[in-house]
Amino acid sequence: MNCDAVLLEISNYIDGEVDAVVRQQIEIHLHDCEGCTIIVNQTKRTVEIFCGDEPLALPQDVRSRLHQALHRKLQM
């Protein structure tokens, strides 16, 4: 398994939709390839952030600016 093959399977790997042989090949490659490990880890984290069950809390200043912008937009 090389970097290109890992990148082609990254979505299926993260979703657990690869067979055991492919999973093992990817994991062996990830053990030896820091670049692909970083990409897989960052992709997993991105999926967790954007697809998680819990919405992300907005900081109060961002929340205030958003409400002000929506209020101005609704008054138009």
Image (cartoon, rainbow, N blue to C red):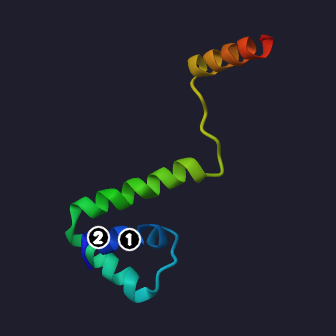
**Residue 56 drawn above or below residue 71:** below
In the picture, measured across the screen, residue 64 lies left or right of residue 28, that is right
- Image quarter of the C terminus: top right
| Residue at screen point 27% across, 80% down | 1
Choose between 47 and 69: the one closer to the eye.
69
In the picture, measured across the screen, residue 38 lies left or right of residue 43, that is left
Helix, strand or loop under label 2: helix
Q: CA distance from mark 1 to mark 2?
A: 6 Å
Looking at the rendered structure, the number of numbered marks drawn on it comes to 2
Residue 59, percent across and down? 57, 24
Contact between labelled residues 2 and 1, with CB atoms less than 8 Å apart:
yes
Q: Residues within 10 Å of mark 1 (few under 14, many from 20)?
A: few
**Residue 69 drawn above or below residue 28:** above
Residue 26, percent across and down? 33, 76
Residue 9, percent across and down? 41, 73
Residue farthest toward the bottom in the current orientation of the protein: 21
| Residue at screen point 65% across, 46% down | 54
| Residue at screen point 47% across, 51% down | 46
Q: Which mark is residue 4?
A: 2
Helix, strand or loop under label 1: helix
Residue 53, percent across and down? 65, 51
Which residue is label 1 attached to?
8
| Residue at screen point 56% across, 48% down | 50
